[in-house]
């Protein structure tokens, strides 16, 4: 997916525009703990394009002076985005800070779409021509708070999207990546996996977007590991910030079937772990939880059970994800990782034949009758799997309103009991059928 970044001085209206472009999608994820607060990254749609949007204004770096902050935000945008929306304030005109940012953006050779915000009425739109002087071509007058002009601006943005055809993923290959806080051991684990004797690394290629894909084969199964962590040590200030590591994680998630969420056994679970994990879950990827640095723990069954209990309590929505305990450093228990990745990937791509699925659903209903609401009983006609990665099921019912969340959850559990789906989220949609 293409990435679009929004850049501009404080108070030009970046987050208003971000929220407008993202629309109601934000509310969909509101029930995932830790994900929505101070959100800086979300999916947006325009015409036939789905893209990822970054609000660089959300990446504040302490109490740095304005110009330094602006410079850092521009750097993030230049590094991360395919297209940059540069927003200026049409009520204030061009300021020194705007010019500073413009200079940086100009040098980047990235496509820049200049948007002049707060143009709330037609008379103001006349003044938009003075912004040609910034050198980014046609300025787009918009009003974030009134929702004006955004369509024209987006037409321009999507016209710069690269052809995605070259980014084909091979069906027989398992793509995976590692996400987690800084210093949790992502780079170490990538190295350990690739150095393991039974792994034959066939090819290492640099891809454009700050990620290295390494292809390897093991016992006849092809894998690609996407490493975004290894690219990070370039000494820029923002790279040590929490939010930047979230951006890194998002990039890794984007290109993966299976995401390994790394937890540091030594320091335990932190708020940031939950935020990062929430994004992986939301993206519908297969997930393996990896507790790294297990060598630092007095390791026995009991310690593992205790740590597992903690993880399950903190990451309730990831109850489907297997947990692997290992040490990237000593390679202790490292052999348990690849089987877990394979299992999660198989679950993610699994198809259940309709007749078998319906046997399970009908048994479930016989055991636990469907709910009633206002005197009306939910009737389930039949179910069918409509997609994989993640496995998605449509349940045809008399009235979708009657499908209570807890009943949906019950059906999900029955499907899991019958078919496993270890390591993969599954989705259930109720749809009306008379
Ligand atoms: P990243 O920021 O997530 O890529 O983390 P790194 O791979 O750079 O590792 C951060 C630090 O943790 C380094 O000092 C590693 O040597 C150390 N480390 C990584 N894995 C382990 C492990 O399994 N056990 C121990 N004791 N230390 C580890």
Image (tube, rainbow, N blue to C red):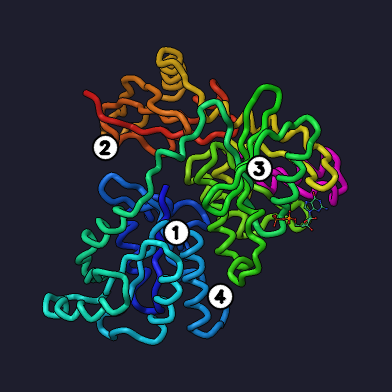
Q: Nearer the viewer, mark 3 or mark 2?
A: 3
- Which mark is on residue 374? 2
Location of residue 6 in the rendering, given as x and y in whole percent from the top left corner: 39, 66
| Circle 2 crowding by C-alpha within 10 Å: few under 14, some 14–19, many from 20 | few
Span of residues in magenta: 287-311
Q: What is the C-alpha distance between the residues marked 1 and 3? A: 29 Å
Q: Nearer the viewer, mark 4 or mark 2?
A: 4
Q: Residue at x 41, y 62 (%)?
A: 110
Residue 2 magenta-highlighted: no
Q: Earlier in the sequence, mark 3 or mark 4?
A: 4
**Residue for badge 4:** 61
Q: Earlier in the sequence, mark 4 or mark 2?
A: 4
Residue 319 visible here: no
Is disc 3 surrounded by few (<14), some (14 to 19) or many (20+) residues within 10 Å? many
- Alpha-carbon distance for marks 1 and 2? 50 Å
Who's the residue at 48% across and 30% down the image?
412
Which corner quadrant of the figure contains ligand 1? bottom right
Are circles 1 and 3 on residues that touch, CB within 8 Å? no
From the Cβ of disc 3, is ligand 1 less than 8 Å away? no
- Considering only order in the chain, which callout, 4 or 1, is on the residue closer to the N terminus? 4
Query: What residue is shown with label 3?
Result: 289
Contact (CB < 8 A) between labels 3 and 2? no
Rendering coords of residue 234 (x, y %):
65, 65
Q: Of the numbered discs in the image, which one, if any, rests on residue 221?
A: none
- Mark 2 secondary-structure assignment: loop
Q: Which mark is residue 81?
A: 1
The residue lying toward the viewer, choosing from 53 and 96, is: 96
Label 1 SS: loop
């Amino acid at each position: 997916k293409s990435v679009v970044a929004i850049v501009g001085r404080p108070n030009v209206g970046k987050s208003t525009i971000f929220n407008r472009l993202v629309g109601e999608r934000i509310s969909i994820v509101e029930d995932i703990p830790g994900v929505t607060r101070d959100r800086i990254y979300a999916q947006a749609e325009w015409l036939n394009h789905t893209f990822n949007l970054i609000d660089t204004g959300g990446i504040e770096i302490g109490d740095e002076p304005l110009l330094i902050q602006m410079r850092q935000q521009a750097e993030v945008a230049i590094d991360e985005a395919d297209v940059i929306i540069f927003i200026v304030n049409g009520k204030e005109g061009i300021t020194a800070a705007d010019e500073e940012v413009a200079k940086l953006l100009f040098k980047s050779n990235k496509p820049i779409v200049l948007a002049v915000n707060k143009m709330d009425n037609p008379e103001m739109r006349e003044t938009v021509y003075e912004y040609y002087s910034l050198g980014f071509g046609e300025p787009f007058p918009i009003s974030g708070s009134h929702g004006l002009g955004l369509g024209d601006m987006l037409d321009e943005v999507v016209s710069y999207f690269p052809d995605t055809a070259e980014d084909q993923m091979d069906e027989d290959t398992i793509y995976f990546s590692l996400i987690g806080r800084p210093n949790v051991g992502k780079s170490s684990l990538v190295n350990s996996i690739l150095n393991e004797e039974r792994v034959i690394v066939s090819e290492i290629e640099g891809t454009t977007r700050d990620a290295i894909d390494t292809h390897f084969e093991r016992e006849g199964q092809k894998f690609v590991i996407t490493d975004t962590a290894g690219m990070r040590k370039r000494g820029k200030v923002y790279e040590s910030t929490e939010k930047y590591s979230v951006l890194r994680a998002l990039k890794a998630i984007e290109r993966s079937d299976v995401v390994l969420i790394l937890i540091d056994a030594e320091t335990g679970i932190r708020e940031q772990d939950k935020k990062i994990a929430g994004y992986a879950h939301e993206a519908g990827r297969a997930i393996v939880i990896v507790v790294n640095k297990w060598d630092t723990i007095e390791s026995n069954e009991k310690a593992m059970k205790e740590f597992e209990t903690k993880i399950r309590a903190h990451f309730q929505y990831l109850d489907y994800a297997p947990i692997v305990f290992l040490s990237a450093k000593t390679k202790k228990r490292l052999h348990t990782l690849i089987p877990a990745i394979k299992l999660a990937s198989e679950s993610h791509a699994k198809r259940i034949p309709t007749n078998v699925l319906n046997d399970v659903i009908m048994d479930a209903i016989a055991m636990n009758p469907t709910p009633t609401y206002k005197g009306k009983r939910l009737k389930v006609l039949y179910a069918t799997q409509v997609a994989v990665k993640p496995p998605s099921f449509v349940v045809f019912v008399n009235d979708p309103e009657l499908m209570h969340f807890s009943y949906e959850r019950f059906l999900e559990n029955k499907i899991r009991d019958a078919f496993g789906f270890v390591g993969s989220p599954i989705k259930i949609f109720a749809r009306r059928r008379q």
